[in-house]
């Protein structure tokens, strides 16, 4: 795949760090954070960043004893002094286990030898609940990690990547979660400075989910208050918009497709000033989060000129009652207007993504969704519903809310399909795996251990059910107030020194 990449960095450096992604290449190279860290570390004179991704089918490779190799060097990843994982969501933790097994390293930090590589984690998962990562990592960077990761790399190098010394150094520091010291209490999420933004791609490749697309951040955070969402206006100060000039100037000359990334891209006050020159250059455009209440004819026309064929917007909940309950500003008239614009500008499909199984949801809400979807179908014939079961996340107003139940979600999907009579496309994600995600999202370190047990047992849904029961995993309810670093730094230090004598 290297020969099809543009922007790959090959360099000699005093220190080489393995950047690991616990999913296959096509997902890894669609990750803006992963790519951005790759570029930033390679900009440091004394460091080189080499990538390693989970193979498409890791199990046979593990059975044959094959090793995970770094792409840039072809060297075994286990030989690197530090392995840094970016973990996007709960179910990717299984990919961490397989990656470490391919390195022939114990997946559990507690049984790794003192001379093992330093193994750290960061990524989007750390904004909600990083605690299930505890069994596998020496340090977790919590929140926005651009500057913290560079600090960790530089300090670790001066300490010769010694696991104990590095953990001792970072215990109690803002943004650094040292599981060996902190146990199941994670620190507050960190915030990067505006100087570290925007995150942007380094490598363009056709072999990704977002084929040959250059990605750039438009805004960090969100200005909205949706109660189910981790990235809401109370997270790290809300939305921080990037100025258009810095976005546009960084787009490489060889780019043919540009993806604008953020929690609410169309909330950027100058989004039209960003999109217009991209389209006028003849480039295709992609936007990660269109908000129906922000779209108008001129903007949808611009998207059509930029190659859009499917307009994807958030409906979020099956009824207006439920949308109001989760503090969504979207109304039926916004979605109807989108359908009219899709028809008027000759786009192919209007796709609505939404959540099923929210607290308080009833069959009447599903019936309202059926009626509304059929009305949309009359406006524009090709309507698709992308549906995900509700999974309560930490640090949101809905933290601690129960999972609706697999049978409940499946019954409501059946009711929805029956009512739509095949005239509207329904694309749901699995209710069973949403339950597994929920158990991890609301879980403690024991949930991480249960995932480890289940994955080694075969990774089937039944394996997860048994493992969660065996480990006594139960959702623990809303997370308690997180103490500040200042409040707990001294006791962390004391705990570390007390435990050093028993560390493997």
Image (cartoon, helix red, strand yellow):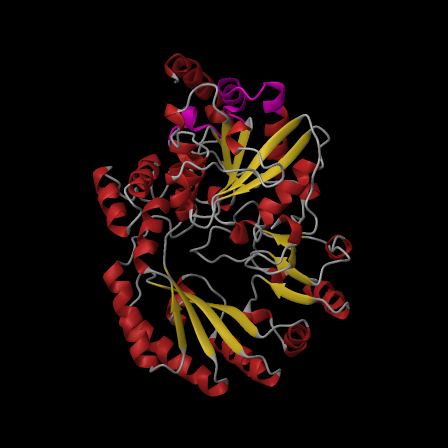
Residue 452's x, y, as percent? 33, 38
Q: Is residue 121 magenta?
A: no
Q: Is residue 306 above or below residue 88?
A: below
Residue sitting at the far front: 64
State the extent of the magenta-drawn residues as a range. 155-183
Work out which residue is located at the far bottom of the displayed protein and give it: 378
* Spot occupied by residue 177 in the image (x, y as percentages of width and height): 48, 31
**88 above or below 333?**
above
194 versus 215 height, above or below? above
Q: Nearer the viewer, residue 35 or 148?
A: 35
Q: Name the residue: 57% across, 53% down.
A: 30
State which quadrant residue 453 falls in: top left
Residue 172 on the magenta span: yes
Q: Quadrant of residue 183?
A: top left
Judged left or right of residue 225, residue 47 is right
Specify whether residue 233 is in view: no
Q: Position of residue 36 (x, y in %)?
A: 64, 45
Query: Could you say where residue 459 lies in the image, as x and y percent from the top left?
Result: 31, 47
Q: Is residue 138 left or right of residue 298?
A: left
Assign the C terminus to one quadrant of the image. Answer: top left
Task: Report the residue at 53% width, 58% height from top.
Answer: 224
Q: Tell me which residue sits at (30%, 55%) in the image.
A: 403
Front residue (pair 345, 433): 433
Position of residue 282 in the picture relative to residue 94 (left or right): right
**Frontmost residue, 394 versus 149:** 149
């Amino acid at each position: 795949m290297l020969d099809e990449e543009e922007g790959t960095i090959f360099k000699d450096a005093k220190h080489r760090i393995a950047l690991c992604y616990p999913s296959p290449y096509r997902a890894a190279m669609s990750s803006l954070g992963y790519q951005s860290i790759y570029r930033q570390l390679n900009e440091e004179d004394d460091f080189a960043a080499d990538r390693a991704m989970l193979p498409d089918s890791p199990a046979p490779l593990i059975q044959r004893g094959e090793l995970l190799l770094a792409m840039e060097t072809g060297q075994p990843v286990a030989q690197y002094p530090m392995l840094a994982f970016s973990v996007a969501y709960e179910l990717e933790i299984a990919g961490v286990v397989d990656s470490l097994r391919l390195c022939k390293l114990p997946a559990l930090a507690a049984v790794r030898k003192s001379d093992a590589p330093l193994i750290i984690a960061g990524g989007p998962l750390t904004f909600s609940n990083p605690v299930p990562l505890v069994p596998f990592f020496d340090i977790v960077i919590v929140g926005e990690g651009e500057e913290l990761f560079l600090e960790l790399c530089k300090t670790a190098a001066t300490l010769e990547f010694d696991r104990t010394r590095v953990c001792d150094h970072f215990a109690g520091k803002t943004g650094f979660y040292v599981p060996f010291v902190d146990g199941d209490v994670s620190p507050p999420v960190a915030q990067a400075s505006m100087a570290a933004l925007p995150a942007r791609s380094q490598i363009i490749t056709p072999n990704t989910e977002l084929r040959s697309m250059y990605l750039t951040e438009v805004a960090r955070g969100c200005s909205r208050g949706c109660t189910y969402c981790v990235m809401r206006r109370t997270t790290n100060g809300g939305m921080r918009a990037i100025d258009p000039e810095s976005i546009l100037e960084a787009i490489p000359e060889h780019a043919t497709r540009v993806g604008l990334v953020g929690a609410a891209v169309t909330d950027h006050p100058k989004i039209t000033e960003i999109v217009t020159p991209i389209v006028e250059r003849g480039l295709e455009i992609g936007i990660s989060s269109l908000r129906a209440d922000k779209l108008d004819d001129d903007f949808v026309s611009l998207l059509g000129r930029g190659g859009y064929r499917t307009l994807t917007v958030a409906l979020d909940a099956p009824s207006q009652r439920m949308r109001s309950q989760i503090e969504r500003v979207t109304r039926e008239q916004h979605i109807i207007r989108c359908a009219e614009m899709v028809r008027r500008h000759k786009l192919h499909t209007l796709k609505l993504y939404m959540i099923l199984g929210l607290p308080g949801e009833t069959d009447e809400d599903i019936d309202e969704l059926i009626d509304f979807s059929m009305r949309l179908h009359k406006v524009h014939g090709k309507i698709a519903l992308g549906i995900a079961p509700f999974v309560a996340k930490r640090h949101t107003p809905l933290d601690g809310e129960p999972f609706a139940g697999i049978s409940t979600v499946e019954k409501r999907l059946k009711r929805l399909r029956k009512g739509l009579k095949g005239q509207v496309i329904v694309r749901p994600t699995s209710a069973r795996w949403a339950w597994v995600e929920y158990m991890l999202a609301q879980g403690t370190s024991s949930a991480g251990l249960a995932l480890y047990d289940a994955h080694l047992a075969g990774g089937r849904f039944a394996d997860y059910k048994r493992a969660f029961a065996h480990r006594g995993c139960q959702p623990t309810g809303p997370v308690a107030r997180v103490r500040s670093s200042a409040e707990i730094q001294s006791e962390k230090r004391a705990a570390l020194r007390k435990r050093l004598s028993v560390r493997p």
